[in-house]
Image: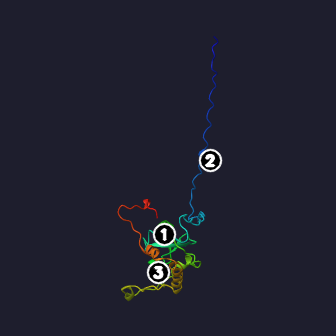
Amino acid sequence: AASTSATWTPCTPRSPPPPRSATMPKAARMYPADDVSKPLRKPNTLKPTKLRASIAPGQVLILLAGRFKGKRVVFLKQLESGLLLVTGPFKVNGVPLRRVNQRYVIATSTKVDVAGADVAAVGDAYFKREAAAKGKKGEDEFFAEGGEKKEVAAAKVETQKKVDAAIAGKLDATMKGYLGSRFSLKSGQYPHEMVF
């Protein structure tokens, strides 16, 4: 039988690594005395906040944070900032026109007719606080008991009355009692098991 011999080929040598200067730039010997300003990265454009599918005008919401925590309010519209415009109405449960974040509300299945409520003029500028005049306080002002009570602007009071009249006028006694009651959990009740 004829013996087959494998042909052997020598290995080709590896190419030498590139010089260090080609891959890594050499550090500068001198640094500038003044800081060289680098152009800042452009911030991402803000996208409008998407309204939750379960929230619609007239929907009754439960507030989860803030001064009126646990109160039931009526949703009116979404503002340009993405916040929700809600009201008690003030005549029913004492909650005025307010802005709330939709993260801190529970949407219920209850709806109220808000067709007559005109809130087109109410925007984010409506809630802007007036800048208080800064002055140097003396000893008498520093130790004075209780600060001056801020009065609500007459235009805001008028707007609140108009919105309340449009919403509260269509509510029956049962709905007024529902909006006036505060939401709370008892022992053994879990929000994730509830249907609102």
Marks 1/3: CA–CA distance: 17 Å
Classify 10 Å Cα crowding around label 3: few (below 14), some (14-19), many (20 and above). some
- Mark linked to residue 22: 2
Please state which of residues 105 and 101 is positioned toward the viewer in this rendering: 105
Horizontal and vertical percent for residue 31?
56, 60
Q: Reading the chain from its start, which is encountered first: label 1 or label 3?
A: 1
Q: Looking at the image, is 32 positioned above or below residue 2?
A: below
Classify 10 Å Cα crowding around label 2: few (below 14), some (14-19), many (20 and above). few
Q: Amino acid at mark 1?
A: Leu
Instruction: Give the SS element for disc 3.
Output: helix
- The answer to whether the residues at label 2 and label 1 have Cβ atoms under 8 Å apart is no
- Mark linked to residue 61: 1
The residue that label 3 is drawn on is: 91
Please state which of residues 87 and 165 is positioned toward the viewer in this rendering: 165
Q: Amino acid at mark 2?
A: Ala
Marks 2/1: CA–CA distance: 65 Å
Q: Quadrant of the N terminus?
A: top right
